Structures are given as C-alpha cells and as structure tokens.
Image (cartoon, grey):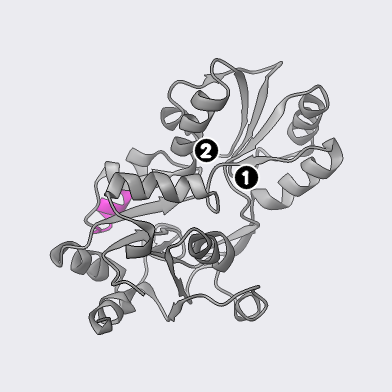
C-alpha cells in the first residue's frame, strides 16, 4: 500500500454525533492540518448547506473551511446540470439545501426529475404517494444517498434508503444515486484535493457507503467504531475494511505508524 498522503473524512458519526464533537476528534483534525495532510469532509448530510456545516464545525473547534466540505446536494447540483439541463425538479427533503442546488430548476408540480434527499417529517404518506405518482408519470428519480439510518443522541433514526427502496419497487424504476457510495462523489473530492485514489484514505463509520465503496474505487478504507458502526454489520460485510480504528482520535497514531 502506498503511503497515505490525503484523507477524505465522513462527518456524522465520525467527527460528531448530533453535531457535538466526539472525544479527541477536534485534536485529530488539527493534527492533520499541522502535519500537512490535505483533507476534505464528505457527507451525505442533507439537512444543512456546505456553508452551514462548515460554520457549525468551526464553532465546535474544528479547523475547517467551506470549500473543504463536500455534500451530496452540491454534487447532485453538478450532476443535474450535466445530465438534466433545464429540467423541472421536485425536491423531497428534510431541511433547506436550496443554496447547494445552484442552477437546479426546483418546481412544486409536474417535474421531469424527482430528487429524494434526507428523510424526516416531510416523508409522510401524502408526499411519498405524490412522488410515486410523478414517477409513474415518467419522472426520473435522483437520490442524494441510500443511507438506511443514522445515529443521533437519541439513538438510530430511519433514513432515506428505507423509503427509496419502496419507491423504486412500487414505481418500477431505479434511482440514480449521487452521494456516497457513488464513485462520482469520491472523484469530485479527489480532484479538489489534487490527489490520487491510491494515496488517499476514506474514514467512515458506514462500512458499505463509506469504507467498502471507497475501497472499490481504489482508496484505502478506514472504518471507525463510532456513530452507526455495528459489530454485526461489520461481521456480515461482503469484504473486510482495510483498517479498523476505535475512533477518529486514533488516526494520528495510526498514520504515524505507517512507513
């Protein structure tokens, strides 16, 4: 394995839970900065914009700037501008992410494309049935991610993937997923960092969407046992992660041991 020279880092469950820093995470990110490791934050979070995420992390002590934050909505905007220029897009999402969807034509009815973001109270029967009708009418389905659940201070909460599977099966369509584990998401961050996949590691708590997806695209995968990590999911994974750490705070020592 080539020496790790850059890091892609998930946020929720890796650095924070409910936006509160996990023990040692702030110091570990500062260590990366002080020791010259380029890094970017990759998140499927769809409840906040890039700027809001950067501001929240900075307020918690993390050394982060907005251009270092890559969100599924921002990547989706690029994808939609390229593949569906000028399309009428209906958004089902919990949270205001309009600022990260620059150039996307958001409409309230008769869409060409349905964008499904993060789950929340908005994912009730009426709205899901409305989306179902749009899909039956020929609208394309673009999903910001397939996460089944995430961890909060109150425990696990159901996420988009559980609803997305039902919409796909009922409408007989397949979603185009633009967030992790999409290769385009990793490629966008690698290009911004100016680094190659074989010199970069992805650190995450989701063994499939973060770690194994990154490994399949040539990155080194580092799984942390925080956030949504579950031993049974780890054991049943189709392949092993390259490395496993108890938490992000252990990353500096791990990198220091590498040749």
User: How many marks are shown on the rendered structure?
Assistant: 2
220 and 173: which one is in front?
Answer: 220
Quadrant in the picture for the N terminus: bottom left
Q: Residue at x 41, y 38 (%)?
A: 49
Q: Quadrant of residue 222?
A: bottom left
The magenta-colored residue range is: 55-62
Whether residue 55 is visible here, answered yes or no, is: no
- The residue wearing badge 1 is 120
- The residue wearing badge 2 is 95
Residue 38 in percent (x, y) is at: 24, 57
Whether residue 201 is visible here, answered yes or no, is: yes
Q: CA distance from mark 2 to mark 1?
A: 8 Å
Disc 2, SS: loop
Is residue 222 one of those drawn in magenta?
no
The label on residue 49 is none
Q: Quadrant of residue 135?
A: top right
Q: Is residue 252 above or below residue 83?
A: below
Disc 1, SS: loop
212 and 153: which one is in front?
Answer: 212
The secondary structure that most of the magenta stretch takes on is helix
């Amino acid at each position: 394995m080539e020496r790790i020279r850059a890091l892609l880092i998930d946020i929720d469950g890796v650095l924070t839970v409910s936006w509160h820093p996990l023990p040692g995470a702030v110091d570990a990110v500062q260590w990366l900065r002080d020791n010259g490791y380029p890094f970017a934050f990759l998140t499927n979070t769809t409840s906040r914009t890039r700027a809001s995420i950067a501001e929240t992390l900075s307020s918690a002590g993390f050394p982060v700037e907005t251009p270092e934050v890559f969100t599924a909505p921002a990547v989706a905007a690029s994808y939609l501008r390229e593949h569906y220029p000028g399309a009428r897009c209906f958004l089902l999402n919990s949270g205001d992410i309009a600022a990260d969807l620059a150039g996307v034509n958001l409409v309230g009815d008769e869409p060409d494309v349905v964008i499904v973001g993060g789950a929340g109270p908005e994912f009730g029967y009426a709205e899901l049935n409305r989306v179902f009708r749009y899909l039956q009418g020929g609208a394309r389905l673009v999903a910001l991610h397939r996460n089944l659940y995430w961890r909060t201070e109150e425990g696990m909460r159901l996420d988009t993937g559980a609803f997305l599977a039902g919409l796909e099966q009922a409408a007989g369509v397949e979603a185009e997923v633009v967030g992790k584990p999409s290769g385009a998401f990793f490629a966008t961050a690698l290009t911004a960092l100016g680094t190659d996949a074989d010199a970069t590691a992805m650190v995450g708590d989701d063994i499939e969407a973060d770690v194994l997806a990154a490994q399949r695209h040539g990155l080194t995968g580092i799984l942390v046992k925080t956030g949504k990590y579950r031993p049974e999911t780890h054991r049943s994974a189709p392949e092993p992660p390259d490395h496993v750490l108890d938490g992000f705070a252990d990353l500096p020592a791990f990198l220091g041991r590498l040749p």
